[in-house]
Amino acid sequence: MRKISYRRDFIDYVLYHYEFEDRVAVWILNFLKSHPVVSKNISFTPDESVERRLRIAAAGTDRPTLVLEKGDIVTTDGEVIFHELNMSQDELLYLEFVFPAVDARYRKVKEIENDLDKELQTIAEEALLKQIDQALDQQDQELFLRLVRMLKRST
């Protein structure tokens, strides 16, 4: 649960330290941090495989407060965004913040997430290598080939 709590802590920090032109941004941030399913599906680091992207801009940035991209659809309507997030809680969401100045804590959170992603990748690769060894020991060629393909895709 460490991964979810640092996300919630950072969203709390944002809510406490920044203001937003659109009050719906505050509702959305509270929604994101208070729903465990949604919280675990948030990423602060970009990933090309994530189709939904939400950008939240603080006051003083001269950017729209809320922008949601989902595939080819882009919306800045806060209520539509809230509805989308609520209806699709299981989908991954890349959450990007735009602040008036560089925020050291935001940079740190992105570093933590990047490190966790690398750690999880290493663990997954090690597990695959063990399974490959077991497939070799059991002389299961079909499983071996499937696992090797998976390993190649992950690296």
Image (tube, grey):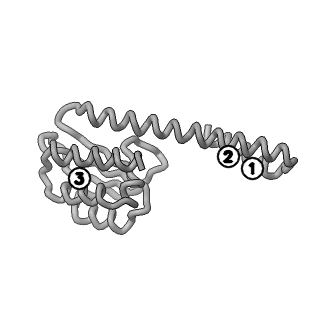
Q: Nearer the viewer, mark 3 or mark 2?
A: 2
Classed neighbour count for the residue bearing mark 1: other residues with Cα under 10 Å, few (<14), some (14–19), many (≥20) = few
Outermost residue toward the right in this view: 139
Which image quarter is the C terminus in? top right
Which comes before the other along the chain, label 3 or label 2?
3
Q: Mark 3: which amino acid?
A: Leu
Badge 1 is on which residue? Answer: 146
> Could you tell me which residue is drawn at 30 percent across and 57 percent down?
32
Mark 2 highlights which residue? 150
Residue that label 3 marks: 66
Decide if residue 88 is on the left or right side of residue 106: right
Q: Are marks 3 and 1 in contact (CB under 8 Å)?
A: no
Q: Position of residue 122 (x, y in %)?
A: 58, 37
Measured as percent of width and height from the top left, residue 13 is found at 22, 44
Mark 3 and mark 1: span between their CA atoms?
A: 43 Å
Q: CA distance from mark 2 to mark 1?
A: 6 Å
- Quadrant housing residue 148: top right
